[in-house]
Image: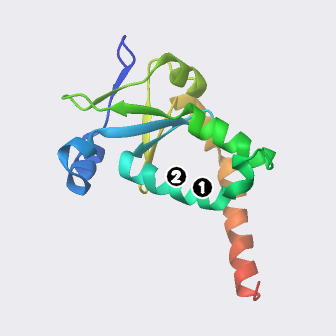
Amino acid sequence: MDAKGRTAMPARFREALQEAYPARRAASLVVVPWFEPCLRVFPLPIWEEKQVQFDAQLGEDDIFGLDEGASDFRRFVYGSAMDCQLDGQGRLLLPGDLREHALIDREVVWMGLGPVLELWDPEQLRQRLQVEQVARIRDRLRLRKGEVGDGG
């Protein structure tokens, strides 16, 4: 990350965006502080799809304030989402409040998660992926597989 808060998107991610979307849409991103101390980066078309899905899941109760959890989800995710553009050099300017949420200071790890990306502070990611955490993930996946195999 440079002194202005810009981080360069790795070339392989930029190339994937450019292949998937027209030039102007490929540079349009939505950056959201996520539930862990990280940021999720959505290409604008994916964000628009996810908004439709979220809205369908959350339903009308939230609009009238009848579902506190859904309202909190909207506040956290929608209220914190920021439209960002890649510059001509493939850099993304991360505003200070987003960097603060993800505890990102000087170094940034870009991680691909299928159609979205995550940005992490290297130490936060290391802690998240500790051996114990990975073992818990493996156990949860085994449990899910067992539930499906048992007819559940």
Q: Are marks 1 and 2 in contact (CB under 8 Å)?
A: yes
Q: Which image quarter: residue 11?
A: top left
Residue at numbered disc 1: 55
124 or 51: nearer the viewer: 51
Do we see residue 35 in this rendering? no
Where's residue 148, x and y in %?
70, 82
Residue 17, percent across and down?
Answer: 27, 49
Residue on which disc 2 sits: 51
Q: Amino acid at mark 1?
A: Asp
- Specify whether 127 is left or right of 14: right
> Which residue is at 20% across, 50% downward?
22
| Colour scheme of the rendered structure | rainbow
Query: Above or below — where is 25 with respect to 146?
Result: above
Closest to the observer, 38 or 135: 38
- Say what amino acid the circle numbered 2 marks: Gln
The residue at the far bottom in this view is 151
